[in-house]
Image (cartoon, rainbow, N blue to C red):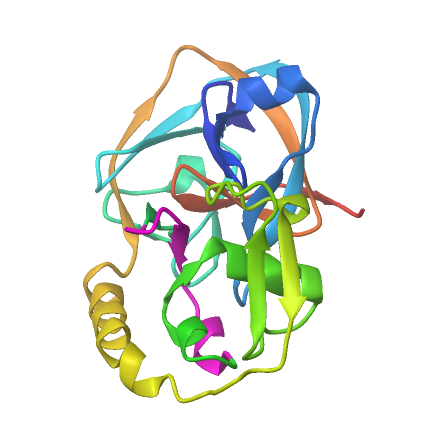
Amino acid sequence: MLATDTIIPTLRGDRFLSDIADAGDNPYIFTWDGKRVTVGRIRVGHRLRGIPQRIELDDGSEVRLGPNTKVLMCDEVPVPASELVVDASLLPLYMKINKQGYFQYREPGEWHKNALTTRDKQPWRLVSRMVAEWKLGRRVRPGDRVVFREKDRRNCAPENLLIEQNEPKQQKQTAKWVKPLLKADRLVREFKNHKVGDLHVDISGEMFSIKGIGAANLAVGGIFVCVDKEAF
């Protein structure tokens, strides 16, 4: 269960859960499959009455979850929100927009280390390239080019991405990417996870039931939670 004002990061930008329910769509979202950040979808069910748990994170953000909603810890073990304690380390999803206006995310696992291009070996990756891997069903190869159909760099929905599969002209990119790689490694060491800052019982009580389509561990407010899983 998630609160009506819970923010869900979708591939078209952040949206309130209540807006998704009112629109009646199943948006593409960020999910965690135990190895990497990937693409999934959610189906928002009916409104429920309950007593949500309001979780304050160490970066000042808040997440409102049902007491039985399971949160993924940094070791990927799911724990009910009602059993969380202060300073518990959660599996994070860090997002940012780079200087060129592209969405980036930090890969929490080791998936990036076996990438086929030097660019994709960085822990901070372009969301568009992650979605391209999901569409292709394989790693992005040297020479593959991801193009935004609508020229909107912040819309990483699969239908907005065109993948041009070309042979690489040259692969000597190492020197160019040495400094960004070192910087990314430092960021990973400094920002390893989110921690619970404080816990509260919220009396507002209005929530939605949700189900995950595809991968089941969806990103909510910068952390990953478990929901019921449905097949496509």
Foreground pick, 205 / 102: 102
Residue 230 placed where, x, y %? Answer: 76, 44
Occupied quadrant, residue 32: bottom right
Asked if the stretch drawn in magenta spans residue 102, the answer is: yes
**Residue 33 seen anywhere in this rendered image of the structure:** no
Residue 19 lies, with reference to residue 155, above or below; the image says above
Looking at the image, which residue sits at the far top? 204
Residue 17 placed where, x, y %? Answer: 54, 24
Residue 122 lies, with reference to residue 154, above or below; the image says below
Foreground pick, 23 / 152: 152
Question: Number of marks in the image?
Answer: 0
Seen at 80% across and 46% down, the residue is 232
Seen at 63% across and 20% down, the residue is 21
Residue 38 placed where, x, y %? Answer: 57, 57
Foreground pick, 67 / 157: 157
Residue 177 placed where, x, y %? Answer: 30, 78
**Residue 43 seen anywhere in this rendered image of the structure:** yes
Residue 69 lies, with reference to residue 37, above or below; the image says above
Which stretch appears magenta?
A: 98-115
Q: In which quarter of the image is the N terminus?
A: top right
Looking at the image, which residue sits at the far right? 232
Seen at 46% across and 18% down, the residue is 51
Seen at 40% across and 41% down, the residue is 83
Looking at the image, which residue sits at the far front? 169
Q: In this view, does 175 lie to the left or right of 205?
A: left
